[in-house]
Amino acid sequence: MALLPLIIWLIEDLLYVIVFPGLVVIMIIVIFLIYLERKIAAKVQMRFGPLWVSKKIGGALQSIADLMRFSFQEFILPNGSDSLAFLMAPGLMFSFALLPLIFIPVGPYYTSLFPSGLTILFSIALITITPIYAIIVGWSSDNKFSFIGSLREAFLLISYEIPLLLSVVAMIIIYKTLDYLPAVAFQEVHSLPGIIINPIAALVFIIVAIRSTGRFPFDITEADSELVMGLFTEYSALFFGIGMATPYIELYIMSLIFSLLFLGGWWPISSHSAGLIGGLFLPGVAVIMKAFIVMAILVFLRSVYPRYRLDQAVRSGWDKIIYLSIIAVLVSIVEAIVI
Amino acid sequence: MSNKKRKTRGVIEGHTKALATGFRYLVEPNRMTLDYPAETIKLPSNYRGFFTVDDKKCIGCSMCEMVCPPEAITMVPRVVSSGGNTVPADQETSTGAKPAKKTKRPVVNWGRCIFCYFCFDICPVDAFISSPVHDLSFYDDADYRPTYEKYLKLPEEPYKDSKKVTSKPDLKRGIKYEPAP
């Protein structure tokens, strides 16, 4: 009868990945976030934004209408494309964008689901895989816009990966762990969120999060005025929908990591609470709410900033952000010695 | 060194200012958009919209056809009937001994027309009639090339029940919409 706990464990794992905080929650958040992004940008730019799909509730069903449109659209396979890569890459990109979620605990109950002591390391490692599929997407479409978009992605990837790792390393030095749970516990014990402990690392992480999810002012890979739709120029139907949703999922993952490392994780709720509700659901709600606020702030940048040129973005990556991240590491070393 | 410092400060100041301005607009939205199908701007009667021709005034001189830049106007052969109106040339209704007077009338291809109103300017007898109807499209390709009889009727204004407003320049908001008198 040792089988029963195993089955329960498996079901709980599946629920973790598929329902909370996995696919279903991501789906709801992405749909609402796209609507919010359009509304915020419209408000700042003196427009109405989506409105006529459901006028009484301010056009809130616009994203769902878009989803339905993507679902029933005809899919076109371009003649010159590398069809296998063309068909596989968006799905793989989507899955690998989703995969870091397994290594991101949203509550102390997580330890019993996926016992691992290296969650920070794994999640950051998995984040860096997604851009490789972005490059494959651009190459397989046999379209100059997609190809230029993927080249830009590669340039930016190289220039911003090191600051991302260094800003996380800076926090690892302070927390003295590679696991999220002790990191959150550290912030709880000292009652100091990471953003106050090392604001420079938080700034670098936010900038890199904006960069790696292709938000303004770094939406260079899919600059619509230059590259039509960038990587996803040749895509249509649900494949395009997946391509559009992937950056939002990356944004969600990045915001979760940010709220765990820098905003105290599930801070109002104790790390010692147990059970499925107290140990997973309530802390999860706290973490996701923090992540959502971070996402809303990042989405707000769209309405303020114009787009950087590729050379400006790459130069700022090698010239400024990397120095900032090294300073963040030095600050962390000093703080670790003092504390 | 001092120059570089000043530059760095300028960058930080610029980002802060930009974000603060964006946030101010987010909190106090200043919408200039006209909520279009629900509200429409009241247009003057001489607005350059869809137009037609006065069948009785027109003398069939073909000046409008000549001046039309996109060659949207074509002249169709007509015959003057006893009432002063015209009828198609193939339905000749000669009255009495007098032979029917042959003439021409303009028809506009709406798919080609650019609404420049050169035809209005050149018409020697001011036979064209303007209307403010401009927000109209056709579901059928054939509707873009009306017959003369169809062309004589001005198209109906869409969104008739919409709120009529007038736009006014405003120092604070840019453009302000007020209910039309």
Image (cartoon, coloured by chain):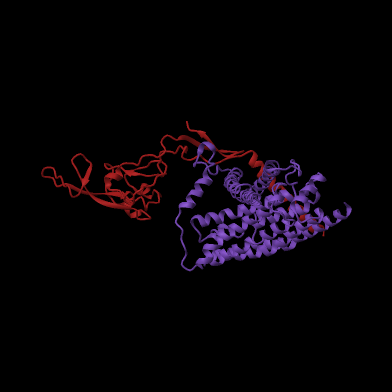
Chain colours: A purple, B red
**Can the viewer see residue B126 in this picture?**
no
**Count of marks overlaid on the render:** 0
- In the shown orientation, is residue A118 left or right of residue A309? right
Residue A201 appears at what percent x and percent y?
77, 54
Furthest-right residue in this view:
A338
Q: Quadrant of residue A168?
A: bottom right
Furthest-top residue in this view:
B181
Above or below for A227 versus B42: below
Residue A332 appears at what percent x and percent y?
82, 55
Q: Quadrant of residue A93?
A: bottom right
- In the shown orientation, is residue A307 left or right of residue A162? left
- In the shown orientation, is residue A106 left or right of residue B153? right
Q: Nearer the viewer, residue A89 or A52?
A: A89
Residue drawn at 40 percent across, 49 percent down: B115
Residue A65 appears at what percent x and percent y?
50, 46
Above or below for A129 versus B12: below
Q: Quadrant of residue B57?
A: top left
Residue drawn at 32 percent across, 48 percent down: B143
Residue drawn at 53 percent across, 46 percent down: A63
Residue drawn at 39 percent across, 47 percent down: B137
Furthest-left residue in this view:
B97
Residue A328 appears at what percent x and percent y?
79, 56
**Can the viewer see residue A181 in this picture?**
yes
Above or below for A232 versus B132: below
Quarter of the image with the N terminus of chain B is bottom right
